[in-house]
Image (tube, coloured by chain):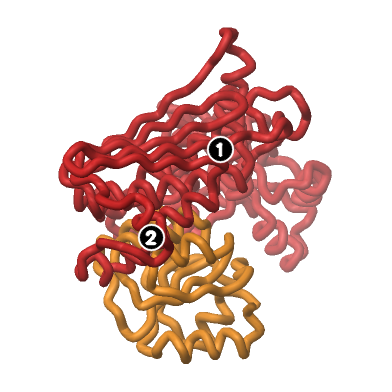
Amino acid sequence: MTLQDVIDQLHLKVLTQPADFSKVVPTGGYTSDLLSCVMAGAKKGTVWITLQAHLNIVAVASLLEMSAVIITEDAQADPATIAKANEEGITLLATDKPTFEVVGRLWEMGLR
Amino acid sequence: MGTGQEARRVVTDEAAGHISRVEELSYELKIGDVMTRDVQTLTPDMEMIDALQLLRRHRISGAPVVADGEMIGIISIEDLLRAVDRGGLHAPVRDFMTTQLVTIHWYEPVVKALELFGRASVGRLPVVDENGKMLGMLTKGNITNGTLRALQKDYQEEEVRRYRASHLFQDIISDRTSLILRYRIEPRDFTHGGQASNHIKRALLRLGANAQLARRCGIAIYEAEMNLIIHTTDGGVIWVEIESDHIMMATMDDGPGIPDVALARRPGWSTATAEVREMGFGAGMGLKNIERCVDEMNLESKVGDGTRLDMKIILPPEEMFGDTTPVAANSKG
């Protein structure tokens, strides 16, 4: 499963620069809104599902070398967050769906 | 075909951040850097069938027609097809050559040629000097190859830089060599939160650390960095000392200090404010995370004086910096 499949099936909005997402294969998923938990639990190449949308999620995602961050419940990432994500090469995706539903769909798609 | 009216793209500072290295190269590389210099030429009196054989022999798709040292036309596959269509394979080249020549100067940037290829719908451009004398030929293939060569060179230079950094500990002889990195962290500066840890992680990779080690240091420093941002009165300092066999990391601040260090180390305990918690900090997991990432951790604090957090990572023999075993020498992050 590629990141492009995830974007298509969950109708995610791509907030950052478009790239060839069909070449990105997420290694797993992680969800938490507490950054320290993410630091402890998320592995390299994962997709992180959170309703946090502020600048610091980019630092976390970059440090952990994540595939992408899915921002849920229509939480609004401000332009500074998106600019920083572009600078660090982090893909930010957005949806109005709640975290629970997004995680459920990803699990159904086979992401572990 | 374009109209030739396309406005030259205005590059704002913001947009400049998104320009890829390939785009940058299209401005940096000159036509003269990528063109073919050794050009096969035709004469106007040759038969078209000879022109066809020359193109086939040299596996090229076109060639200029030269008479008395002057370029007077160009023959491309299209002209040959036209000749075949009209049974003109034994006609002279001058009857079928294209004489409306689009040329380009050798000193122009590659981006100019890309524009011209798009606009003039030609497959090749004769390259001329200031006086219109032909110097070479340019095809899109030349541009692709030239760009790839330049990218390869960039890559090699980066490799050389990494190589040099990773040999720091081997090349410099002393009884004890260390590299010290210092970062000043401002209180409540969430905008730059994680920047120092990212820089430290990159520095370690450049020194030849393996990805796992760089990640451990990155996570530990990130938590310590955020503690300085969230809790200190006046910010603090991150100090990292890298030696060949271990890494010492420390954060120092001068207040407010932690009243009960044992309590602060308990997972889930935090004094973070509601606003900070809303951002996802203050889970009370920071010190726990640090402990997990480092081999030794020591936290000392006194209310009114400040806090000092020391972290140490001991490098196993195969991961030592400047080690001569193949594992360390080849670790490319």
Residue placed under numbered mark 1 in the picture: B313
Which chain does the orange colour mark? A
Residue in the foreground of this view, choosing between B311 and B239: B311
Q: Is residue B55 left or right of residue B121?
A: right
Residue in the foreground of this view, choosing between B65 and B108: B108
Q: Which amino acid does the dot numbered 1 rest on? A: Ile
Q: Is residue B87 visible?
A: yes
Q: Position of residue A5 (x, y in %)?
A: 58, 81
Instruction: Name the quadrant containing residue B134.
Output: top right
Given the image, what chain letter belongs to the residue carrying mark 1?
A: B
Is A85 rendered above or below residue A74? above
Q: Is residue B18 left or right of residue B217?
A: left
Q: Position of residue B73 (x, y in %)?
A: 57, 44
Is A106 rendered above or below residue B76? below
Residue in the foreground of this view, choosing between A45 and A37: A37
Which chain does the red colour mark? B
Q: Is residue B317 left or right of residue B195?
A: right
Q: Residue drawn at (47%, 60%), measured in percent from left and top?
A: A39
Q: Position of residue B311 (x, y in %)?
A: 47, 39
Residue placed under numbered mark 2 in the picture: A58
Q: Nearer the viewer, mark 2 or mark 1?
A: 1
| Label 2 and label 1 in one chain | no
Q: Which amino acid does the dot numbered 2 rest on? A: Val
SS of the residue under disc 2: helix
